[in-house]
């Protein structure tokens, strides 16, 4: 894909391995927040991505494009597809048990994606250097080995959990009762 230097790991970046306490291969990841646009079950118009990890270090999910996701009549909106990429990439870096946010997301749109299409999404990390993590994702049409319709490359930056409490809704965060393991 056309990837900028900003989303390319520098020489000497660490190649991440599955975390010691990563979910076992094949596990469903669940949602990190019930009202998340990408994965929340309680979001009325969200993408409802249900991801799993095949190996504790990468993430897979399926996304079926619906009428709520259109840009041109009958075709997926590019921003919605970028959101799906952002979500699976975010889920994949969460596997390493540290909180990160998207700093930069680059997306290549290779094929039009009609309503009714199921995209097979996959995300993986290509390197970590200090607070910066470099990640990629792809969405394939109809099957895990189908033609690639969308590709993304991203730079995520590590933050602390206070980032979410300070800038977001601390009460909603507390109400979710998740145990976020940040320093395993
Ligand atoms: C119920 C509780 C829920 C809790 C949540 C649990 C965790 C999540 C779990 C699972 C996720 C699932 C999926 C979620 C959805 C997908 C993720 C999103 O969509 S996140 C939202 C969108 N993103 C933002 O809102 C970031 C907004 N930006 C910022 O907050 C800051 O700009 C931040 C943190 C990115 C950086 O700010 P600085 O002050 O901490 O650090 P500085 O020094 O500016 O940057 C650090 C390094 O990164 C580079 N950098 C930063 N931004 C860059 C950019 N846009 N392009 C290139 N480089 C950049 C800088 O040049 C610097 O590099 P040098 O260390 O000097 O080499």
Image (cartoon, rainbow, N blue to C red):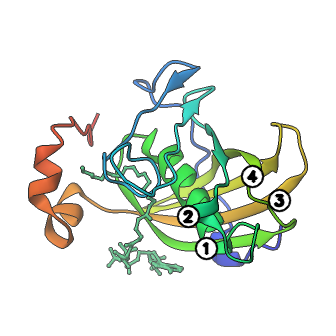
Q: How far is the residue under mark 1 from the one under mark 2? A: 6 Å
Is residue 159 in view from this perspective?
yes
Residue occupying the far right of the picture: 147
Residue 115 lies left or right of residue 56; in this view the side is right
Seen in the picture, residue 160 relative to 71 is either above or below; the reply is: above
Q: How far is the residue under mark 3 from the one under mark 4? A: 6 Å
**Quadrant where the image shows the N terminus:** bottom right
Residues at circles 1 and 2 in contact by the CB criterion of under 8 Å: yes
Label 1 crowd bin: few (<14), some (14–19), many (20+), radius 10 Å? few
Seen in the picture, residue 15 relative to 133 is either above or below; the reply is: above
Q: How far is the residue under mark 2 from the one under mark 4? A: 12 Å
Label 2 crowd bin: few (<14), some (14–19), many (20+), radius 10 Å? some
Report helix, strand or loop for mark 2.
Answer: helix
Q: Which residue is mark 1?
A: 79
Residues at circles 3 and 4 in contact by the CB criterion of under 8 Å: yes
Residues at circles 2 and 4 in contact by the CB criterion of under 8 Å: no
Q: Which residue is mark 4?
A: 139
Label 3 crowd bin: few (<14), some (14–19), many (20+), radius 10 Å? some
Of the image marks 2 and 3, the number of the one nearer the N terminus: 2
Residues at circles 2 and 3 in contact by the CB criterion of under 8 Å: no
Q: Position of residue 157 (x, y in %)?
A: 43, 65
Image mark for residue 83? 2
Q: How far is the residue under mark 4 from the one under mark 1? A: 14 Å
Is residue 10 in view from this perspective?
no
Q: How far is the residue under mark 1 from the one under mark 3? A: 14 Å
Q: Answer yes or no: disc 2 within 8 Å of ligand 1.
A: no
Image mark for residue 149? 3
């Amino acid at each position: 894909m056309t990837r900028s230097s900003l989303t390319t790991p520098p020489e000497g970046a660490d190649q991440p391995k599955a975390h010691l306490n990563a979910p076992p291969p094949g596990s469903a990841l669940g949602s990190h927040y019930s009202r998340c646009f990408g994965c929340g079950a309680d979001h009325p118009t969200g993408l409802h991505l249900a991801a799993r990890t095949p190996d504790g270090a990468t993430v897979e999910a399926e996304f079926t494009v619906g009428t709520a996701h259109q840009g041109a009549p009958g075709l997926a909106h590019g921003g919605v597809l970028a959101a799906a990429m952002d979500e699976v990439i975010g889920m994949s870096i969460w596997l390493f048990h540290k909180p990160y946010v998207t700093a930069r997301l680059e997306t290549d749109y290779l094929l039009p994606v009609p309503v009714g299409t199921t995209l097979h999404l996959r995300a993986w990390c290509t390197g970590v250097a200090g607070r910066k993590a470099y990640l990629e994702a792809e969405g394939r049409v109809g099957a895990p080995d189908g033609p690639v319709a969308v590709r993304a490359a991203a730079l995520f930056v590590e933050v602390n959990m206070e980032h979410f409490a300070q800038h977001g809704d601390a009460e909603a965060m507390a109400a979710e009762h998740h145990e976020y393991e940040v320093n395993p």
